[in-house]
Image: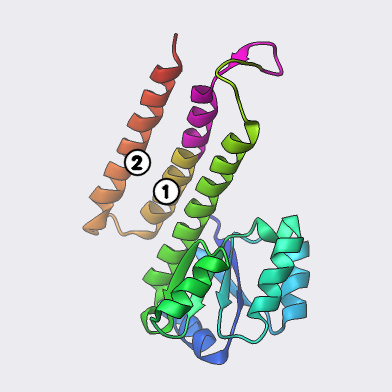
Amino acid sequence: MSTAGSQVLFLGELPFWLKISQSIVEAPSSSFKICRAPSLAEALRRLDSEQWQALLLDLSHPSAQELLAARKLHDGLDSVPVVALLPISDPQFQEAAASAGAAASLVLADVNVASLQHAVVTAINTETLRNSSRKVSSMSLPFEQAAVDGRPVSKLDAISHAVNNLLCVINANADILSDQLDPSHNATRSVTQIKKATKSAADLMRLLKTP
């Protein structure tokens, strides 16, 4: 999520949009901007032609399954993490969200600006982890393999790169929270500690790679 405000697309029924709209009104300085797609065709067009950090998808919407099917057939659409919006807290809906490959989920009754931001950040981080895991798996590296520059590459190098990417995401999200919080807020210290821990983890990863 960028500090300039993340672009999030919403496709769903009116009850969800009313709660989301109210949350936006209550927190106009939120670090993300949510836009509503009035139809499946509009959602597909915008996902294909514009940059989005996440997709809020109401699983009770008639077009939800069509959009999920379209994502599987289109690499560009499939790269946008999905937050599944569930009308009620029910195991069947939770299972449907998992089957749809949702990176996070949120129940209608729990929708507010804090839960929305948490769900979006969770979805982005989860999708980043999935992509990193796919990259490491697809490499099928033996313990020693020639890299493009001729130097040997190990599994440690690949995993280190993936972990560093995740640390960058965590640090960026901490920056967003830091910008949104008043300096006197109790959570400010916690955000600072997250940033320090992220830096320490990055330093440790560099030490692991040092001969």
Q: Which amino acid type corresponds to the residue marked 2 in the rendered image?
A: Lys
Residue 150 on the magenta span: yes
Q: Which residue is mark 2?
A: 195
Residue extent of the magenta highlight: 147-165
Identified at 75% across, 71% down, the residue is 44
Identified at 37% across, 69% down, the residue is 114
Find the residue positioned furthest to the bottom. 14
The quarter of the picture where residue 77 lies is bottom right
User: Which of the colour schemes (rainbow, by chain, secondary structure, one colour) is used?
Assistant: rainbow
Q: Which residue is mark 1?
A: 175
Residue 58 x, y percent position in the rendering = 55, 80
Q: Determine whether the residue tagged by mark 1 lies in a helix, strand or loop.
A: helix
Residue 110 on the magenta span: no
**Mark 1 neighbour class, 10 Å CA radius: few under 14, some 14 to 19, many 20 or more:** some
Q: Is residue 40 left or right of residue 85?
A: right
**Mark 2 neighbour class, 10 Å CA radius: few under 14, some 14 to 19, many 20 or more:** many
The quarter of the picture where residue 151 lies is top right
